[in-house]
Image (cartoon, rainbow, N blue to C red):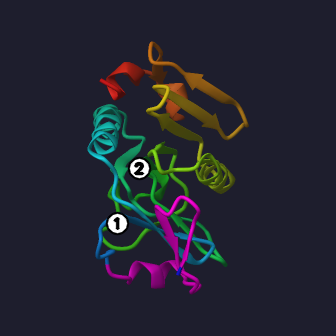
Amino acid sequence: MAYHADVATAVTETVLTAEEFYQLPDPEQGGKIELVRGRVVTSMPVSGKHGERQGIIWQALRQFLSTSRQGRTTIETGYILRRDPDVVRAPGVSVAPAALLEDGELPEDGFIEGAPLLAVEVVSRTDSEREVLEKVGEYLDAGVARVWVVKARNKTVVVYTASGDVKSVPLAGTLTSDDAGFASSGFTLPVSMIFA
């Protein structure tokens, strides 16, 4: 097992498929595991504030999606973004588009094959800028319409779009339907609520 410089992330050297990866047991120490180019990457469990911020974002998205029916919102759900070698990422919060759902439902077992409409990454103090930008690139390359990077250090949300635009929404700003990649208007989430 190799360790990244920040020692918060461990990487295995065995190359797995998404299906083999799904059969692995949960990490004994907790935390999140993802598959990056066929290799298992294990991250430390998140802090209380990190988890709370994910919950606030999930709740706001879920409330909007309960009436707009554009997809389902999830926390740390695995998406197969690429094959051979396989990449399975689990955004902190995501919106699974209706097109990837079977009869409007999320799969009971296995990962979602395809890209989320929106991927949200809440940055932890142990996350390096390089690792975060690598995830953003993987999401966009896989067809994700919008990626949010939530930065507690400066209380902003950076919105990356499939067209290549990047926008920083400050603490006094509000995230909108366009920022989330939604076809219908009406979604709003003040950034201050995320950091309340």
Which quarter of the picture shows residue 52?
top left
Q: Identify the residue shown where x is 43% and y is 47%.
A: 94
Q: Is residue 183 left or right of residue 104?
A: right
Residue 133 percent across, percent down from the top left: 64, 47
Q: Find numbered disc 2 in the image and state the secondary structure of the residue it sits on.
A: loop
The reply, left or right, for residue 135 in relation to residue 92 is: right
Nearest to the eye among marks 1 and 2: give it.
Answer: 2
* Disc 1: CA contacts within 10 A as few (<14), some (14-19) or many (>=20): few
Find residue 134 and name its label: none
Pinpoint residue 29: horizontal percent, then vertical percent: 30, 71
Q: Is residue 76 magenta?
A: no
Residue sitting nearer the eye, 182 or 147? 147
The answer to whether residue 169 is above or below residue 109 is: above
- What residue span does the magenta drawing correspond to? 2-25
Question: Left or right: where does residue 176 sit relative to residue 142?
Answer: left
Please name the amino acid that badge 2 sits on.
Gly
User: Residue at point 59% right, 42% down?
Assistant: 145
User: Is 120 located above or below residue 178 in the figure?
Assistant: below
Spatial separation of the CA atoms under disc 1 and disc 2: 18 Å
Q: Would you identify the image quadrant in which residue 45 lies? A: bottom left
Label ID, residue 107: 1
For the residue carrying disc 2, how many other residues have a C-alpha within 10 Å: few (<14), some (14-19), or many (20+)?
many
- Residue 121 in percent (x, y) is at 48, 45
Residue tagged 2: 92
Examine the rendered structure and indicate whether residue 136 appears above or below residue 60.
below
Q: Residue furthest right?
A: 164
